Image (cartoon, grey):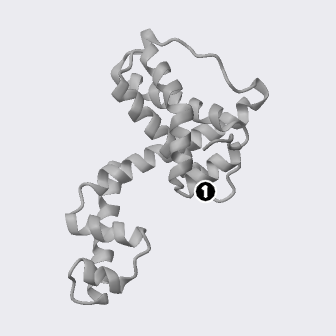
Amino acid sequence: MDKPIADDELLNGLCQGDSATIRHIYELHAQRVQKWVLANSGTVEEARDVFQDGIQALFESGSKEGFTLQSSFEGLLFTICKRQWFGVLRKKKRWQSIRQAPELIPDEEDDDMESILIRIEEDTARAHNLASTFTQLSSLCQKLLKLYAKGKPPEEIVLLLQMTDRNAVYQRRKACTDRWKVLMKQIA
């Protein structure tokens, strides 16, 4: 992408899964997050994970109805990634070596930003729980639910998963989602 992309366009492209926009986001912002994580007791792999988690959290929040970007895309993404890294460090008890990065967001926006970040952290935790419990489902359940998430019609799912008919797809989907709910309740 040759010309700069506006913050709203970056967020919209991310939420729509536009691969060119996502690639552009990585090109613009991944190295900065990596440098910060490396400067604060992290590894390259941890920096990649933190950046990916930050992108995922921003995607989930940005996809919600009514979400509006109230600061720069870069500032919000970097702040989310910092908080993700602080969470990792909390778990690893490596707080001693943290060097604070300069704040990117003016003080008057701190209250709004704080509530946004809290929601993003909650959404990230929920997404992590969903992902970890999803892997505990059977292979068939995972395939079935992924196909539903992609919007595949039941007739196509019957063919792809070699099931008997649409009713079998509906029944299996219900059983899979019920099992997933049970797994989620066990974590909560």
* Location of residue 158 (image quadrant): bottom left
Residue 123, how many percent across, how many down? 51, 47
Query: Is residue 146 placed above or below 119 in the rendered structure?
Result: below
Local SS, label 1: loop
In this orientation, does residue 80 appear?
A: no
- The kind of residue tagged 1 is Lys
Identify which residue, 130 or 106, lies in the foreground.
Answer: 106
Query: Is residue 31 placed above or below 188 in the rendered structure?
Result: above
Left or right: 121 as drawn, with respect to 49: right
In this orientation, does residue 126 appear?
A: yes
Furthest residue toward right: 108
Residue name at image x 42 percent, y 69 percent: 150
Residue name at image x 57 percent, y 48 percent: 21
Residue 104, how many percent across, how many down? 68, 24
Residue 134, how many percent across, how many down? 30, 57
Residue at the spot of label 1: 64
Quarter of the picture containing the N terminus is top right
